[in-house]
Amino acid sequence: MNIASNAEKKARAIAFYLPQFHPTPENDTWWGPGFTEWTNVARAKSLFKGHEQPVIPGELGFYDLRLQETRIAQAELAAAHGVEGFCYWHYWFAGRRMLERPFDETLATGVPDFPFCLGWANHSWKRNSWTGVRHNKSDSLLIQQTYPGINDDRAHFDYLLKAFKDPRYITIDEKPLFVIFRPADMPDAKQRFDLWRKWANEAGLKGLYVVGINSLNFSDPRSMGLDAVTLLMLTAMHEKKSLMHRLARLSWKIRKSLLSAGPRTIEYREAIRHLVTNLDRFDCEAYPCVFPNWDSTPRKGRRGLVLANSTPALFEKHLNDAVNQLDGRPIEHKLLFIKSWNEWAEGNYLEPCARWGRGYLEALRRVIFGSN
């Protein structure tokens, strides 16, 4: 696979990758036999005038991640359009792993020969997160995220070490890059990450480079053992009413959507003005995170959030704004996170779709390689 060197790029684009597109015993039990995220994508409905649902995938089709051919095709597309590597979402619940097959097979076989890192999605799974139907608290929890102690920390690290030692693993200053989804939810984050760094050094690595995802819900990354943060401002917009109200003042269309029965709707061209900001507010490095699109109604129905009227051209502007904020940094530290490669049930994807084809990927290629 022909992967361009970092020296040829304006930024190191790392795309979050969801390994949900294959059946698992847990999903069969919770949602019915054969459930994958494609189930939500296919049954999505248009909820307002001009709402484009269902969204249909393009050339990769409704794929199954158990197939190596699919994983190779994804990597080839990504490499050709400036993605340095995938950040595979990793699920660890006190020794129990979920959705592990695509990455395990990638790690075991060496195929595709494409860079990667891991992001620990350290949140409990609830029914409300995957469906628009509200559930009582007693039946909402599917699996709880816990932190049992040092034995679990050691077992978790030993699994991760196999990935960290893979020559494809993405590094920053020769340290394996590890992303943590909700560092603020972890009661002993600094203790854990300091211990993992110690074990990494003992295993012959240079340490770890830990990046926490921040939706402005914490202000002191160093106290959590983080080397850096990346800002998921869309999460802040979705969850924090103050930010939603601030955006609501921008236009009558936004105010009207907030007062309706849902889904909440914000114009993409307005949202991207707020999605890459505040990189200098922390006492550590902060990296931008860009969104090609967003529509979580396939999962959440009228409880969802829609960034309406996204286009590849607007995404290209969003990318340029983000890359410009990285000016002056050495290329090693010009990280650009992209959410996401394939979160189709959130309407959040770089992969080709029926409407735009490779349009979002081509926008990324032009920005990353500085070409027209």
Image (spheres, helix red, strand yellow):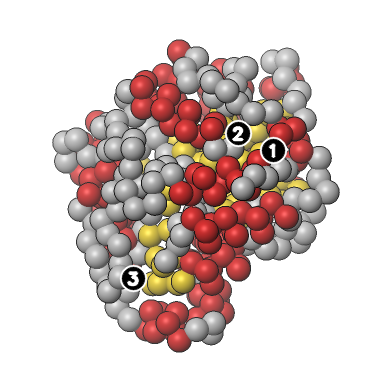
Q: Residues within 10 Å of mark 3 (few under 14, many from 20)?
A: many
Tell me if residue 78 comes above or below residue 272 in the rendering: above
Distance, label 3 to label 1, CA atoms, is 38 Å
Tell me if residue 291 comes above or below residue 210 in the rendering: below
- Of circles 3 and 2, the one toward us is 2
Local secondary structure at mark 1: loop
Label 2 belongs to which residue?
Answer: 84
Q: Position of residue 269 (x, y in %)?
A: 52, 69
- Of circles 2 and 1, the one toward us is 1
Distance, label 2 to label 1, CA atoms, is 9 Å
Tell me if residue 25 comes above or below residue 36 in the rendering: above
173, 115: nearer the viewer: 115
- Of circles 3 and 1, the one toward us is 1
Q: Residue at x 57, y 55 (%)?
A: 316
Q: Position of residue 309 (x, y in %)?
A: 42, 66
Check disc 3 and give the amino acid type: Pro
Query: Which label's residue is closer to the chain start, 2 or 1?
Result: 1
Residue 263: image tag: 3
> Given contact means CB atoms under 8 Å apart, are the residues at marks 3 and 2 in contact?
no
Q: Residue furthest top?
A: 109
Local secondary structure at mark 3: loop
Residue 371 figure quarter: top right
Query: Which label's residue is closer to the chain start, 3 or 2?
Result: 2
> Given contact means CB atoms under 8 Å apart, are the residues at marks 2 and 1 in contact?
yes
Q: Residue at x 24, y 65 (%)?
A: 46
Local secondary structure at mark 2: strand
Query: Which label's residue is closer to the chain start, 3 or 1?
Result: 1
Label 1 belongs to which residue?
Answer: 9
Q: Name the image quarter holding the N terminus.
A: top right
Check disc 2 and give the amino acid type: Glu
Q: Residue at x 36, y 27 (%)?
A: 70
225, 215: nearer the viewer: 215
